[in-house]
Image: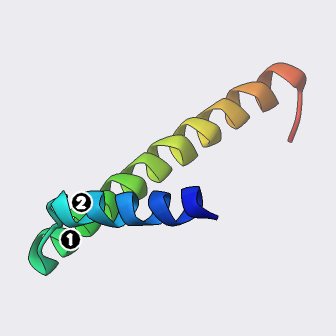
Amino acid sequence: MNKATQFVQEAYSELKKSSWLTRKQALESTRVVIILVALFSLYVAGIDFILSIILGAVLGGR
């Protein structure tokens, strides 16, 4: 039990040393991530659409 208590104390101590993002920085980072995920999703959907057309033509699909 002593080791568990020591671990929690050390973890808490390390968390106090770390620097945290401000609210504005967190919102800006979140916005960037959402935009990049949306763009990447559109890219993957476009590639999927093109490949499905090509594969349909090659295999004689509709």
Looking at the image, residue 62 sits to the left or right of residue 49; the answer is right
Please name the colour scheme applied to the rendered image: rainbow
Nearest-to-viewer mark from 1 and 2: 1
Question: Which residue does the numbered mark 2 point to in the structure image?
Answer: 32
Where 30 sits versus 3, above or below? below
Counting labels gives 2
User: Where does label 1 land, which residue?
Assistant: 26
Rendered position, 22 above or below 34 = below
**Which residue corresponds to the image point at 11% horizontal and 74% vertical from the top-left?**
22
Q: Residue furthest top?
A: 58
Q: From mark 1 to mark 2, how far is it between C-alphas?
A: 10 Å
In terms of depth relative to the viewer, which is nearer, 16 or 53? 16
- Residue type indicated by callout 1: Ala
| Viewer-proximal residue among 21 and 14 | 14
- Which quadrant is the N terminus positioned in? bottom right
Q: Position of residue 13 (x, y in %)?
A: 27, 62
Element carrying mark 1: helix
Left or right of 22: which side holds 41? right
| Residue 43 x %, y % | 45, 43
Quick one: which residue is furthest to the front in this view?
2
Q: Is residue 10 above or below residue 58?
A: below
- Along the viewing direction, whichever of 21 and 51 lies nearer the viewer: 21
Relative side of 50 to 6, left or right: right
Residue 30 image point, x, y percent: 28, 67
Residue 52 image-quadrant placement: top right
Q: Identify the residue at image location x=25%, y=68%.
A: 31
